[in-house]
Amino acid sequence: MQQLDPREFRNALGSFATGVTVITTAEQNSDGSRRPVALTANSFSSVSLDPALVLWSIDKSAGSFAVFNDCTAFAIHVLHDGQRELSQRCASSKGEKLRDGEWRYGELEVPLLDECKTLFECRVEHRYEGGDHIIMVGRVVNFERRDGGGKEPALLYYQGQYQQLDQSSAA
């Protein structure tokens, strides 16, 4: 069997345009307090309408892997084009991911961003091994279509860069 070049494989995967999401959960501290945890992901996908299931995957080497691997709930936020800075902040391994005043705790006690295109609150339904990732399947218990950012289009990622949706041909 031919050995795949990881860099070339990653570049080939980049030819598929995706939306950009921020996934959040809360880490329970030893004193009982919670700390918001967030990361940027473009591995989001729908799984089922009945029951309402979605999935995303997390790299086992991610700094927040242990928190997400142990969580019982998470939220998926579909970003709009005006949220590139938030996406980059949550993708970074350094610094504060979520700032005071831009989120609140939701029904499942996970951080919810105050602004995004769409929000899904999920309970963890399944975790599956997926090579160097864990595939997280969530049962959607609440969702909101917000169209955050006014009429800004969704934030897209293609060939290693943020891209803008051309809405000139949209009906």
Image (cartoon, rainbow, N blue to C red):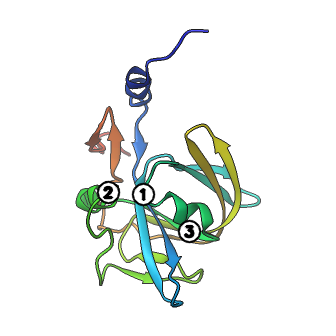
> Which SS class for mark 1?
loop
Q: Position of residue 125 (x, y in %)?
A: 72, 62
Q: Residue at x 25, y 56 (%)?
A: 84
Q: Amino acid at mark 1?
A: Gly
Q: Identity of the amino acid at label 3?
A: Phe
Marks 3/1: CA–CA distance: 16 Å
Residue 107 percent location from the top left of the image? 58, 83
Give the numbered dot on residue 74.
3
Residue 39: x %, y % from top left: 41, 59
Q: Position of residue 149 (x, y in %)?
A: 29, 67
Name the residue that disc number 1 marks: 63
Taking the image as shown, residue 77 lies to the left or right of residue 50, namely left
Would you name the residue on which mark 2 appears?
Answer: 93
Question: On screen, 100 above or below 37?
Answer: below
For the question of whether residue 4 can be seen, the reply is yes
Residue 74, picture quadrant? bottom right
Marks 2 and 1 in Cβ contact (< 8 Å):
yes
Residue 91 vertical placement versus 3 (above, below): below
Q: Is residue 82 left or right of residue 10?
A: left
Disc 3: CA contacts within 10 A as few (<14), some (14-19) or many (>=20): many
125 vs 3, nearest the viewer:
3
Q: CA distance from mark 3 to mark 2?
A: 19 Å
**Is 20 left or right of 46, judged from the image as shown?**
left
